[in-house]
Amino acid sequence: MNKILEVKDLKVNFETYGGSVQAVRGISFDLHKGETLAIVGESGSGKSVTTKALMGLIPTPPGKITSGEILFNGKDLTKLKEKELEKIRGRDISMIFQDPMTSLNPTMKIGNQIMEGLIKHQNMDKGKAKRRVIELLELVGIPNPSARVNQYPHQFSGGMRQRVVIAVALACNPKILLADEPTTALDVTIQAQILELMKDIQQKTEAAIVFITHDLGVVANVADRVAVMYAGKIIEIGTVDDIFYNPKHPYTWGLLGSMPTVDSTEDELVAIPGTPPDLIHPPKGDAFAPRNPYAMKIDTEMEPPLFKVSDTHYAATWLLHENAPKVEPPLAVKRRMEGMASGLNNGNSGGDFS
């Protein structure tokens, strides 16, 4: 697969009255043409900040990329000036935001909002741009697009507004599409339609997608690879099969265990105890240690590296060290893993270890 994006040791801080919040603490990953990488984790884990950094949308101040590289077409996006980023943003890298009503301008007709990118980045005249807008609305499943192009956002349902936002993002045929929880505000039926639409569009355009979500059920249906984030770090990354069949990090076990399935009962759900750490003063060692029932002494002293599980699978937990005790996921988590595995098969393709 062709590598289209490479993120190396990215760190993002936000200055507050209480101190510097280390929102993203040195993450690295690659993105390949035509693949979907899902980034999952609790609120505050750094998912959305990561995507905003890729788009050059970190507000400065109070935010700042303090170190790292974001390599796209041989260019480090962190080194570019705003005018240079404007040429890439929307044309090569586009974003689908979470809430379509706040993403769209309520005073502008949706046709004009989609045309902006075409006129700016594709140098189209208004006539050609309008024809392209109608094609895009048809592509995303808006009925009677030639008439609806002249309507305002409030005249569309929530699901249709999200389709319009996707059309805006697709206008310039971007190479990378960043989707920040694009289905969270939608009901389950519309959510399924939007996810199916995104898969269909990806097959037609070969765009790479970074999909941000906290819903592992969504991940199973849309992603090729999954990166699990916790406290500003990627603590496990692998293919969908790796994460659902063979998760290695206790935090990933917790996420799987807390996800209800059709066959699960309320008593079987596993809650992750405690709360995420204060990222103004991140804990020494493994940030997940205070919430980890399998934590060892070394977890409070040294931060674990990303251990290699396979060529596609890595996890940052001392449980993978050769001297660590062998620990199995809880029974409820195993059942959830089995349930997810069945669903995937049916639907898809050095320290003291005391």
Image: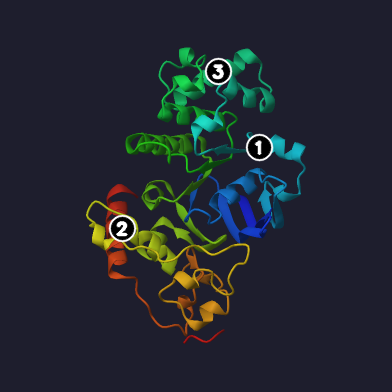
Quarter of the view holding residue 192: top left
Please give left or right for residue 231 compared with residue 270 in the image: right
Amino acid type, residue under disc 2 in the picture: Ala
- Judged by depth in the image, the label closer to the viewer, 2 or 3, is 3
Q: How is the image coloured?
A: rainbow
Please give left or right for residue 84 compared with residue 114 in the image: right
Mark nearer the N terminus (2 vs 1):
1
Quarter of the view holding residue 127: top right
Mark nearer the N terminus (2 vs 3):
3
Using the rendered image of the protein, determine whether residue 309 is visible from the camera's viewpoint.
no
Q: Is residue 174 above or below residue 241?
A: above
Number of numbered markers: 3
Residue under label 2: 341
Amino acid type, residue under disc 1 in the picture: Arg
Per the model, the C-alpha gap separating discs 2 and 3 is 45 Å
Residue under label 3: 109
Per the model, the C-alpha gap separating discs 2 and 1 is 37 Å
Q: Nearer the viewer, residue 25 or 33?
A: 25
- Judged by depth in the image, the label closer to the viewer, 2 or 1, is 1
Residue 89 disc label: 1
Q: Residue furthest front?
A: 17
Residue found at x 67% / y 56%: 13
Secondary structure beneath dot 2 equals helix
Expressed as whole percent of the image width and height from the top left, the position of residue 21 reads 64, 58
Quarter of the view holding residue 118: top right
